Amino acid sequence: MHLAQVADLVRRDAADGVQQQIVAAVIDAGGQVLLVRRRAADSRGGEWEFPGGKVDPGEDLTTALHREVVEETNLRIAEITGYLGAFDYTTRSGTYNRQHTWSVTVTTTEGVRLTEHDAFAWVSAVDEIPLGPDLRNILEKYLEA
């Protein structure tokens, strides 16, 4: 995805009234995708998700993606290989979020270190780990491609 396309996503989000942009990475390692599980005490505790998180004020989407992957997994993105789409949701506090998800490769899959989650799994099929419908659709689309 070129910078102009990323800028288009940002403009569209602003026009749609998105209050918080979220980025997430489908990390592929030889046909397996990394999922992380939220700690029980967290908002949406126990749910599995792709590594990612909030875009900080003044931060661009791809910079946030790189930062969040390192912060949450200790892995470094080697390449962003594709844009997988977005979905919207509203938090319990009423914030309107839009999550943008990219497929990525990492420099190495060794040394996953979790800082915000309590478990991780490498999966090669959609039904290996229970996922919410939005994440399931993204993973299904990705694995079928």
Image (tube, rainbow, N blue to C red):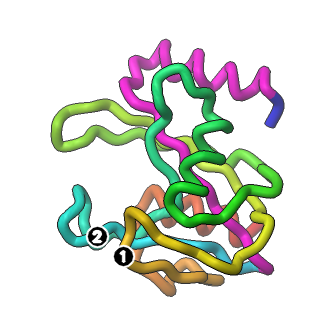
> Residue 14 location in percent, x, y?
48, 16
Residue 15 belongs to the span the image colors magenta: yes
Q: Dot 2 corresponds to which residue?
A: 39
Q: Nearer the viewer, residue 28 or 66?
A: 66
Residue 64 belongs to the span the image colors magenta: no
> Residue 41 location in percent, x, y?
18, 66
Taking the image as shown, residue 134 lies to the left or right of residue 106, namely: left
Residue type, numbered disc 1:
Asp
Q: Which residues are magenta?
A: 3-30
Q: So how many labels did they put on this image?
A: 2
Taking the image as shown, residue 39 lies to the left or right of residue 71, namely: left
Residue type, numbered disc 2:
Arg
> Residue 66 location in percent, x, y?
65, 47
Q: CA distance from mark 2 to mark 1?
A: 5 Å
Taking the image as shown, residue 40 lies to the left or right of residue 32, namely: left
Residue 57: give its label. none
Q: Dot 1 corresponds to which residue?
A: 118
Dot 2 and dot 1 residues touching (CB under 8 Å): yes
Residue at 75 percent across and 79 percent down: it is 31
SS for dot 1: strand
Looking at this view, name the residue that lies furthest to the bottom: 128
Residue at 59 percent across and 22 percent down: it is 10
Quadrant in the picture for residue 85: top right
> Residue 75 location in percent, x, y?
65, 65
Residue at 62 percent across and 28 percent down: it is 60
